[in-house]
Amino acid sequence: MSVRLFSLLLLLATIGCNGPFLLLPGGSLDGEVKPAPSDWAFAGDYGTVQLETRPEEPYSVNIAYTVMDGRLYLNAGDTETQWVKNMTANPLVRLRMDGVLYDLRAERVTDAAEISSFGKAWTSQSMFRRDPAELGEVWVHRLVSR
């Protein structure tokens, strides 16, 4: 397959997707909207979801999540990514999990004890994950009902 054909197919796949495509960010997410659960335990200990930030001009990404004590967390580590910058400007987000959309609000976690607890849960998922408690400034967020 030629590079040109592959590029065209990738472009068509990206345009045809609703939201992010692999590592490429996307726009608005769609799906059935449901109320945010009070306990995220049903989602398992961790996984991958789509996160939409910047409601006025949607920006979505695929992202790993961690559930700890029934609360859902996202971690950018010590990198202030574009989605983190978007949540800082406007904490209203959407999360798509298994085709269902949840309207949520992002709260940055700054409490050292909570970051430490999160770090234990986060690093238990893979030997390649860095403990945010050992980093300088970190961007760990808890997603809560609006």
Image (tube, rainbow, N blue to C red):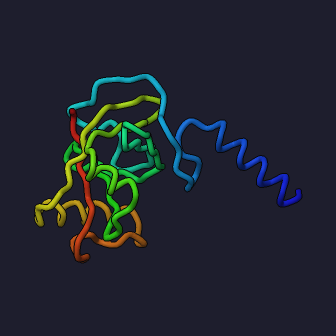
Nearer to me, 39 or 115? 115
The front one of 27 and 121 is 27
Q: Residue furthest front?
A: 56
Name the residue located 33 percent from the left edge and 56 percent from the top edge.
Answer: 84
Q: Residue at x 53, y 45 (%)?
A: 26
User: How many marks overall?
Assistant: 0
Q: Position of residue 97 (x, y in %)?
A: 42, 36
In the depicted view, which residue is nearer to us: 24 or 95?
Answer: 24
What is the quadrant of residue 144 in the picture? top left
Q: Residue furthest right?
A: 1
The vertical placement of 37 against 77, above or below, is above
Question: Which residue shows up at 32% across the image and 67% down it?
Answer: 77
x then y, percent, for residue 22: 58, 52
In this rendering, position of residue 30 left or right of residue 134: right
Quarter that holds the N terminus: bottom right
Q: Nearer the viewer, residue 87 or 17?
A: 87
Q: Is residue 101 above or below residue 84?
A: above
Residue 95 placement: quadrant: top left
Q: Is residue 124 above or below residue 95?
A: below
Q: Could you tell me residue 73's position as x and y percent?
A: 28, 51
Point out the image quarter for the C terminus: top left
> Residue 66, how many percent across, how many down?
32, 52
